[in-house]
Amino acid sequence: MKRSIILLAVLVVAVALLIACAAPTPATVVQTKVVEQTKVVEATRIVQQTQVVEKVVTATPPPTAAPKRGGTLIAARAADATGIDPHKQTAFASFRMLELIYDPLFAFDKDLKIVPNLAESWKFSDDAKTLTVTLRKNVKFHSGNPMTSEDVKFTFDRIADEKTGAAARSTFAGIDKITTPDANTVVFALKAPNAAILAALTNPNSAIIDKKAVTGGADPAKVDVGTGAFMIDKWDPDRTFTMKANKDFWLPGQPRLDAIEWRTIPDEASILAGLRAKTLDWAYINDPRVAIRAGAGGSTLAISRAPALAYHVLQLNAKRPAFTDLKVRQAISCAIDRQEVLDTASLGEGEVVSPATPPYYRANFNDLFCYKKDEAKAKQLLTEAGKATGLKFKIMAATGEPPTAVAEAQNIQAQLKKIGIETEIETLELGVYVDRWLKADFDAVVALNGGNPDPDVMFYRYWHSTGNLNLVAAYSHPDIDKLLDQGRAIADPEKRKPIYNDIQKKLTEAVPWVWLYVGYEYRVGQPYVKGFTPLPNGSLIYLREAWLDK
């Protein structure tokens, strides 16, 4: 149990720093200084911090005394889900739907601390190589079948099966064996201590599915086999996705809504128009330009704005001829002013970031290769590589996720032209983009990748040679493998931090990607939509608590 307490300390420190490091907001934000003492249960250490907590002022009236039940929330987003099998999806648009339909064993609470979800409790052995999870009783799948430990084992056996093509397969490769002593107990025997496994178990890619339904012929790519707060009612791809409340949901009194009708509206300016016309109740907005306009001109819309962990990045495919030479990749990194990309594409709404986005694990820019633009060095590197002229490649970008992608690509294109590199921007519909991205079928790509309070969850699947997204990363190195294995096995945040600093130094020097910036998560709605809490990881899980005050 000691090690699990230490692991929670990692997230306590990370989340505290996430709040402290948040970027300043527009004029609609007031700042309040709060002195908060956080105890970290490790030896007798106490961390004393002064935090700046941002409070967004909106026109939302005070809530009524008690939440109301019922009603349908009419919500909008710019991109539809690319699929409904929770173990295979990687697009944010899919995650935002699946986390309402499926449940993993654990979740992040509103302070990004790990809390039980389908699990009731957990305990690590003294050597941290055995994780025992006690499940909640009386949980039912949407089929009506009871959830037991056999469903959990079936889920992780499916994830581990290479034929499944699960997005989190390498994340759970450290599980040696799963046993089920009784219907409500699952024991994970680990090959080595894994400080990140609880954080990994919060992800929709680890959602528990209905063994009886799937073995009986139900295909998770076609039907809902979850336990979540909402059930799929009907899905008209790229138009509407309707969810109805799960009346047997395991949290008493939730969900409070009867249904959510999601409308896919590719143009976020049109979403804002719908909100202003009150034909929409609520929306999640990705484009900071639209979010800023939403609060302008005496608007009565309620706007939430949370610092994001997801990061904007220019991925270079080091296996393509244009990028096999390290000096070429380094030249590109030196030529790009990251702040200019942020200012141009996102109107400065965010901050330049190192590869690790959790504030506690962020590396000092002075320790990272070419984090300050240096055109002279970029040109010198191209000359040394014999590419002073004639270098050309394509930059792939999705239309809609993120909505800033094309603007980012255009600014990068303009900056690279100054050192003699010619680029062509290839824009694709999201589903086609994701398919090409997963196959690493690109020269370079502008992407928005998911962040996590634990850096192992962010790094291992991309940068370890066994990672199931290493094909997409297109780069690995034995030294990075070794460091990732070390970081995963250590629970103490102070001992983990220098390991992830070294990983970030090696990655930015090798330049398989050019990390750019993090932005904000925006949610905009009518004042009568109450109860929703946004999270920095973008999760919509707390729509299960939302209600309509009308």
Image (tube, rainbow, N blue to C red):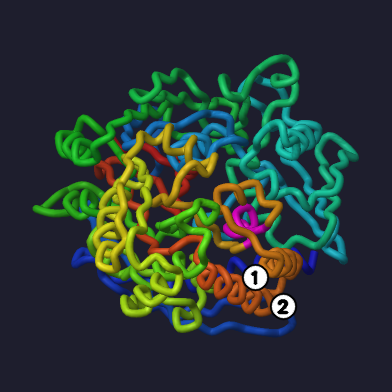
Secondary-structure class at tag 1: helix
Residue 149 in percent (x, y) is at 80, 36
Sequence-first tag of 1 and 2: 1
Seen at 72% across and 40% down, the residue is 136
Q: Is residue 459 magenta?
A: yes
Q: Quadrant of residue 460?
A: bottom right
- Specify whether 437 is left or right of 34: right
In the rendered image, residue 451, in percent from the top left (x then y), is placed at 51, 57
Badge number at residue 51: none
* Foreground residue among 380 and 41: 380
Taking the magenta stretch, the answer to whether it contains residue 470 is no
- Residue picked out by circle 2: 42
Secondary structure at numbered mark 2: loop
Q: Main secondary structure of the magenta part?
A: helix
The correct choice, above or below, for 13 with respect to 160 in the image is below
Q: Nearer the viewer, residue 259 or 160?
A: 160
Classify residue 371 by image quadrant.
bottom left
Question: Could you say which disc has been placed on residue 9 in the image?
Answer: 1
Are dots 1 and 2 in contact, CB under 8 Å?
yes
Region rendered in magenta? 456-464
Q: Is residue 506 above or below residue 43?
A: above
Quarter of the image for the N terminus: give it.
bottom right
> Residue at (49%, 77%) from the top-left corner?
368
Cα separation, mark 1 vs mark 2, equals 8 Å
- Say whether residue 159 is left or right of residue 510: right
Q: Residue at x 37, y 51 (%)?
A: 393
- At a point 69% along the width and 70% down the height, the residue shown is 479
